[in-house]
Amino acid sequence: MNFLGSWNNFFYPFLVLTNKYMMTLPLALNLLRGDPYRGMDYGVLMLATTLALAPVMLVFWAASRRFIAGMTAGAVKG
């Protein structure tokens, strides 16, 4: 189900959106792939992926104690 949700987050906006300013993050990263015949600039693609992932990782790092406490609170019996 997770794969299907991620695929739909890419495929439906890929079909519908025409304005570059309204693109979702997976579509913007897909634009950075470039032309497959001339080769891809992997440095730019990895930098963009890292910058896109950084806010999510920072939020998880800041709230990791609460995430772990919430997971273990439901697992303890009694």
Image (cartoon, rainbow, N blue to C red):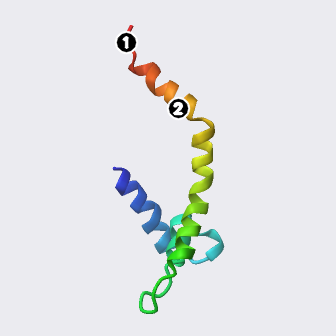
Residue 21, position as x, y percentages in the image: 66, 72
Q: Residues within 10 Å of mark 2 (few under 14, many from 20)?
A: few
Q: Relative to residue 45, is residue 22 drawn left or right? A: right
Using residue 36 as the reference point, say whether residue 27 is left or right of it. right
Query: In this figure, which residue is indicated by the disc labeled 2?
Result: 67
Label 2: which secondary element: helix
Q: Amino acid at mark 2?
A: Phe
- The answer to which of 62 and 21 lies nearer the viewer is 62
| Residue 17 appearing in the image | no
Q: Amino acid at mark 1?
A: Lys
5 or 69: nearer the viewer: 69
- In which image quadrant can residue 76 be found? top left
Taking the image as shown, residue 16 lies to the left or right of residue 55, namely left
Q: Secondary structure at mark 1?
A: loop
Is residue 22 left or right of 36 when viewed as pictured? right
Q: CA distance from mark 2 to mark 1?
A: 18 Å
Is 60 rendered above or below residue 17? above
Badge 1: residue crowd in 10 Å (few <14, some 14–19, many ≥20): few
Residue where numbered disc 1 is placed: 77
Residue at 56% from the left image edge and 56% from the top image edge? 53
Residue sitting nearer the eye, 56 or 27: 56
Q: Residue at x 53, y 32 (%)?
A: 67
Q: Quadrant of residue 54?
A: bottom right
Would residue 42 be seen by someone viewing this image from the given angle? yes
- Position of 4 relative to 39 (above/below): above
**Residue extending furthest front?**
43
Residue at 44 percent across and 23 percent down: it is 72
